[in-house]
Amino acid sequence: MKTDNCSNLTNPFSLSFGKEPLSLIERDYQNNEILQSFESDNPAYQVCMITGVRGSGKTVALTNIANQLRSNTNWIVIDLNPERDLLHTLTAELSNRKELLQLFRDAKINLSVLGFGLEIDGEPPVTDLIVALRRMLEKLTRSGKRVLVTVDEVSSTPGMREFASQFQIFLRENLQVFLLMTGLYENIYELQNEKTLTFLYRAPKIEMKPLSIPLIMKKYQDIFGLTTDEALSMAGATMGYPFAFQVLGYLCWVKKEKWQDLLPLYDTYLEDYVYEKIWSELSPKDQAVLTAMSSASSGKVENIRSLIGMPSNSFTTYRSRLIRKGLIISPSYGTLRFALPRFREFVRRQVFLSVE
Ligand SMILES: Nc1ncnc2c1ncn2[C@@H]1O[C@H](COP(=O)(O)OP(=O)(O)OP(=O)(O)O)[C@@H](O)[C@H]1O
Ligand SMILES: [Mg+2]
């Protein structure tokens, strides 16, 4: 590897979550799908959810889409924290935007009583938060502006449910508001199954697919000066899993060794940063299915099912749930394999250690 002269340079790979990395692999086709709908004159949908396993790049994709819209002056992008009071923060954020002040003054929206500092002499103050928010959104819609609200890592909390159900009302009122959320499959599933939030059920869910192997190869080749074959085997070892792409690059950069010699470290990082967490969040039955998969002699469903003696219909339930969670894939009818790199080895270790 040609990394001898790189020691003083910044490592182009990053292990931090939730932040756009220096080495970014494009996901244009997935991001554009959302952007095109949001930007169209007649949006096919105004709410969209990004799901995927931990480390699959949900936050990075959300940030990327939000930043692209932010650069367009017709868009007002507001990032909300699901742990805070979402409606309150949205109102506060809108009323604090300097570029919108005049617009709201023209609409004579006096928010002094609500404590948002938008004060207009001689106008009766708005006393209800929802009324204030609606009036601001109406004004923005009439002025040709669109508001994108992003919420990273949603789950079915009372605050999130309240926010989503109010959002549904704003949509019915034809306001130009858009909502982009990310979440683990199980959390999104729980939220959309709330009786009052059926509109989320219909909203598209974009699943984070693996990154393109040719693009990963190119990146590794450019950074480490590898041959095509070397780059292909290194990219293959990530299986397109974004966090693995960063870890393997990071380790090769720091250690200046071939990736094949770094497998124990690669396993340790994957385990410590994500796999342990993923495993701890699975039900015992999900764990049992994965355990059977890890020791089965082939990926054949029959083979795996017979190892745990599970009837066909309950196996189908676990199988589809694990697929939706992004942990396994079905490459062809009747077969299954792990979706994440070195996950089989990780599961084997869990089995072995739990027997101790
Ligand atoms: N398009 C990409 N190209 C290269 N690396 C990426 C890309 N997207 C994400 N990553 C890397 O993958 C890791 C995880 O990204 P991110 O934090 O977006 O995942 P996440 O799905 O939001 O995870 P979590 O569910 O834990 O919040 C980070 O190290 C990030 O740098
Ligand atoms: Mg995230």
Image: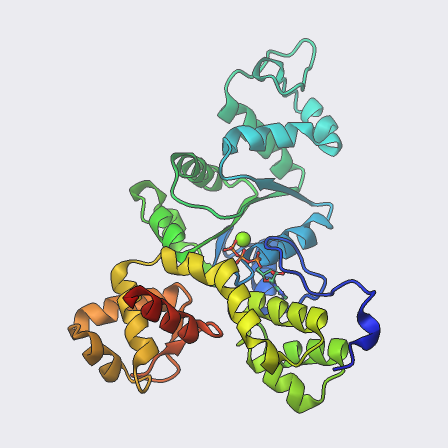
Q: Is residue 302 visible?
A: yes
> Is 305 in front, or is 113?
305
Locate residue 45, reporting x and y percent. Answer: 49, 54
Q: How many marks?
A: 0
Residue occupying image coordinates x 19% and y 68%: 314
Residue 153 in percent (x, y) is at 49, 48
Indicate left or right for 77 with 298 as reference: right
- Name the quadrant of the C terminus: bottom left
Q: Using the rendered image of the protein, determine whether residue 41 is visible from the camera's viewpoint.
A: no
* 159 lies above or below 297: above
Return the residue found at the far front: 356
Question: Residue 100 in the image: x percent, y percent?
Answer: 71, 32
Placement of 225 over or under 207, stated as above or below:
below
Camera-nearest residue between 196 and 23: 23
| In this rendering, position of residue 232 left or right of residue 10 | left
Q: Quadrant of the N terminus?
A: bottom right
Q: Position of residue 249 (x, y in %)?
A: 66, 71
Q: Is residue 108 above or below residue 316?
A: above
- Residue name at image x 24 percent, y 84 percent: 303
Image position of 341 with respect to 177: above or below: below
Residue toward you, 116 or 142: 116
Taking the spot 72% from the left edge, 27% from the top edge, the residue there is: 101
Q: Which residue is pictured at 42% across the width and 66% down the height?
A: 326
